[in-house]
Amino acid sequence: MTKAELIEAVMAEMSRVWGQEGLGGEKREYEWLLQIYGITEEEDVQWQLILQDDMDDLPEEDLEDGELMTFLADQPAVVTFLEAFLQKYREHSAVHPR
């Protein structure tokens, strides 16, 4: 899959799991995400940064982070991350209880 296809697939999985309200970033939500899907808060933040970069919407502070920008410029590394992230979401069918 291409980076664009992976982003679209992750967004679809997140909609399935989190519904219209989405992941709000609350501690209890991240605890549930880690327990059920094995996804850490750090992985979710990395996903958000990839998405923001794809939309050319990274905050100035992130644009100045050399390590982050090096990662985001490394397309094979980004694709590898997205593939693993998507796989974690696809391994389970649980929907976040609201």
Image (cartoon, helix red, strand yellow):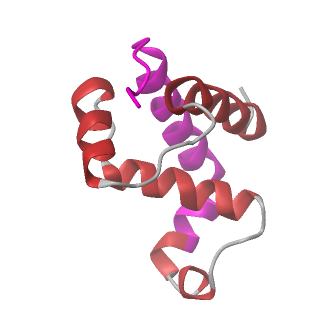
Q: Residue at x 50, y 26 (%)?
A: 17
**Residue 94 shown left or right of residue 80 in the figure:** left
Q: Assign the N terminus to one quadrant of the image.
A: top right
Task: Judge by depth and name the residue closer to the eye, 88 or 30.
Answer: 30
Q: Assign the C terminus to one quadrant of the image.
A: top left
**Residue 34 shown left or right of residue 74 in the figure:** left
| Residue 44 picture location, percent across and down | 43, 49
Where on the picture, by quarter, is residue 82?
top right
Where on the picture, by quarter, is residue 45?
bottom left
Q: Is residue 86 magenta?
A: yes
Q: Is residue 93 magenta?
A: yes
| Residue 24 picture location, percent across and down | 46, 52
Q: Residue at x 54, y 48 (%)?
A: 77
Q: Is residue 40 above or below residue 33?
A: below
The furthest residue to the front: 98
Q: How many marks?
A: 0
Task: Judge by depth and name the residue closer to the eye, 36 or 83.
Answer: 36
Residues drawn in magenta:
69-98
Where on the picture, by quarter, is residue 55?
bottom right
Q: Main secondary structure of the magenta part?
A: helix
Q: Residue at x 65, y 51 (%)?
A: 75
**Residue 18 shown left or right of residue 38 in the figure:** right
Q: Is residue 41 above or below residue 60?
A: above
**Residue 1 shown left or right of residue 79 in the figure:** right
| Residue 59 picture location, percent across and down | 62, 80
Q: Residue at x 46, y 24 (%)?
A: 89
